[in-house]
Image: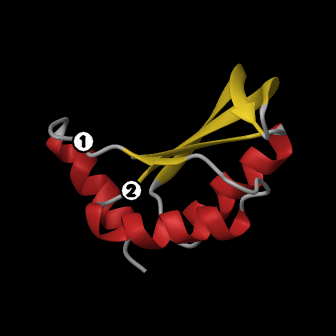
Amino acid sequence: MVTTVVDARQVADVLAAAAVAARLAACAQVGGRVDSTYWWRSAIETTTEWSVQFKTAPDRVEALVDQVRASHPYEVPEVLVTRVESGNPDYAAWVHEQTRP
């Protein structure tokens, strides 16, 4: 699973659709607004953001991360990869099948 956050719902929707259309993700879920507090340029900032979770196969992670980073509007985007150790094998098979070009 690959996750990121962006500053607008429309941007989240574009990232999600692009990843699925390119078959880099089997699905992408755009989550509701979250408030993020962080250090940026020597100051603490708080921003409302939208989260995006991409479900992908292990062999597609690198290409997906590259696409998200290239399309992301932030100077230093948060792009996190979480390896899923177990789950529904039928879902894992579906994810693998849907991420084939």
Question: Residue, x 38% and y 56% (percent of image)?
Answer: 56
Q: Is residue 65 above or below residue 10?
A: below
Disc on the earlier residue, 1 or 2 = 2
> In what element is the residue under mark 2?
loop
Residue 17, horizontal then vertical, whole percent: 67, 58
Residue 93, horizontal then vertical, whole percent: 22, 55
Question: Which of the 4 image quadrants contains residue 52?
Answer: top right
What is the C-alpha distance between the residues marked 1 and 2?
Answer: 10 Å
Residue type, numbered disc 1: Val
Residue 7, horizontal then vertical, whole percent: 81, 39
Residue type, numbered disc 2: Thr
Question: Residue, x 34% and y 43% (percent of image)?
Answer: 82
Q: Is residue 88 above or below residue 65?
A: above
Q: Residue 56 bears which disc, if any? A: 2
Judging by the rendered image, the residue that carries numbered circle 1 is: 84
Where the C terminus falls, by quadrant?
A: bottom left
> In what element is the residue under mark 1?
loop
